[in-house]
């Protein structure tokens, strides 16, 4: 039954709603490539692996924060909401402690979104002291010292999972790109892919959640991204090597919107744990989006401070949560039809 639920959660989270001017018609092909590679519903797979690996009082690292000045100086609304949803799910459902990691400039929207989701932020000294609480850490910019920082973080917190949600990874030449093939200066980014690399070396579960092929995790299907995305092979910057990241994760969840992929994992966790409240409700969704935008995150398509995610308005975000809840709650019910 969990795989059946995951099947339809995957389908719902991969409904493409992009406008002209953006790469269109690639969402489901990317999903199909990731599904073919992994052989089972993606949201179900991520949730199942979390249930297998994460227990009470364990820590889970969540990486997010996309964008750069001047367009998205404090990040975008895609990423922080999915991160808060998963933080809430692993905290309430599995009893784990979420640890957020992002660039310093992006942390304020991440923290505000977390608080709106009901997950308080605590100091380092209080990590693990109670449920419904997380730690927020900034990661230094650029390549210098990034690998050592990653090792120190993993040594200190001993996470059972590292999850990246809408977190850009470098291509084969080490260049970061937007989905439109525009170079993102490497020195403006936290090179947190060292965390996913080191976690994999240590046998720690890694999950990448994205929507374009340039996010951490898509290295699992890099050749497909090159073929499917408009700027997959050839970008608009001098590197001429495309947006496809080479950074893979153990599990890749590909969705129409990265937040939606994370919501899908939360929904599958809710079903597998038998508690629909593990997935946040529609009111919380609105609170999260409002808090994220108010704290400085911008819509990732329009680059403006509005209640939208990737150009999709808040009503649609709430509707998605409503439908996910229907899938989960009906899946948990039993009814013997008499006719």
Image (tube, rainbow, N blue to C red):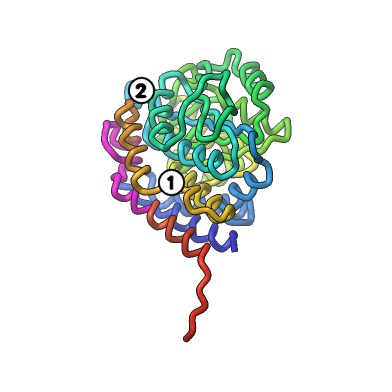
Q: State which mark lies toward you, 2 or 1.
A: 1
Residues rendered magenta in the picture:
300-320
Give the camera-side residue of 191 and 65: 65
In this view of the protein, can residue 276 be seen by the observer? yes
Query: Is 123 positioned to the left or the right of 159 in the image?
Result: left
Is 312 one of the magenta-colored residues? yes
Residue located farthest toward the right when viewing the structure as drawn: 202
What x and y, as percent, mark residue 315? 29, 49
Residue located at (66% from left, 40% from top) = 55
Q: Which residue is mark 1?
A: 280
In this view of the protein, can residue 20 be seen by the observer? no
Q: Is residue 17 above or below residue 193?
A: below
What x and y, as percent, mark residue 248? 61, 37
Give the camera-side residue of 114 and 235: 114
* Residue 164, quarter of picture: top right
What x and y, as percent, mark residue 102? 49, 24
Give the camera-side residue of 127 and 293: 127
Give the camera-side residue of 189 and 291: 291
């Amino acid at each position: 039954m969990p795989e059946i639920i995951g099947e339809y959660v995957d389908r719902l989270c991969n409904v493409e709603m992009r406008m002209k001017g953006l790469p269109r018609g690639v969402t489901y092909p990317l999903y199909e490539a990731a599904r073919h590679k992994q052989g089972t519903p993606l949201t179900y797979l991520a949730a199942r692996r979390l249930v297998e690996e994460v227990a009470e009082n364990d820590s889970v690292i969540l990486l997010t924060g996309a964008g750069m000045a001047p367009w998205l100086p404090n990040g975008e609304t895609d990423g922080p909401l999915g991160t808060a949803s998963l933080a809430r799910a692993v905290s309430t459902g599995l009893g784990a402690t979420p640890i957020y990691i992002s660039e310093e400039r992006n942390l304020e929207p991440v923290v505000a979104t977390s608080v709106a989701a009901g997950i308080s932020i605590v100091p380092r000294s209080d990590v693990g002291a109670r449920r419904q609480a997380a730690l927020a850490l900034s990661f230094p910019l650029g390549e210098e010292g990034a690998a050592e920082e990653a090792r120190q973080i993993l040594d200190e917190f001993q996470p059972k999972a590292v999850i990246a949600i809408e977190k850009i990874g470098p291509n084969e030449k080490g260049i970061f790109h937007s989905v439109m093939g525009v170079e993102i200066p490497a020195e403006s980014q936290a090179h947190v892919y060292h965390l996913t690399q080191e976690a994999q070396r240590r046998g720690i579960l890694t999950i990448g959640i994205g929507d374009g092929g340039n996010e951490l995790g898509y290295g699992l299907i890099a050749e497909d991204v090159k073929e499917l995305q408009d700027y997959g092979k050839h970008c608009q910057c001098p590197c001429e090597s495309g947006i496809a990241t080479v950074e893979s994760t153990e599990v890749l969840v590909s969705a129409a919107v990265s937040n939606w992929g994370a919501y899908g994992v939360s929904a599958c966790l809710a079903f597998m744990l038998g508690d629909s409240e593990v997935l946040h409700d529609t009111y919380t969704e609105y609170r999260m989006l409002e808090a994220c935008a108010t704290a400085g995150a911008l819509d990732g398509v329009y680059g403006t401070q509005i209640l939208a995610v990737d150009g999709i308005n808040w009503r649609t975000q709430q509707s998605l949560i409503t439908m996910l809840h229907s899938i989960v709650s009906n899946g948990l019910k039993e009814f013997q039809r008499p006719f």
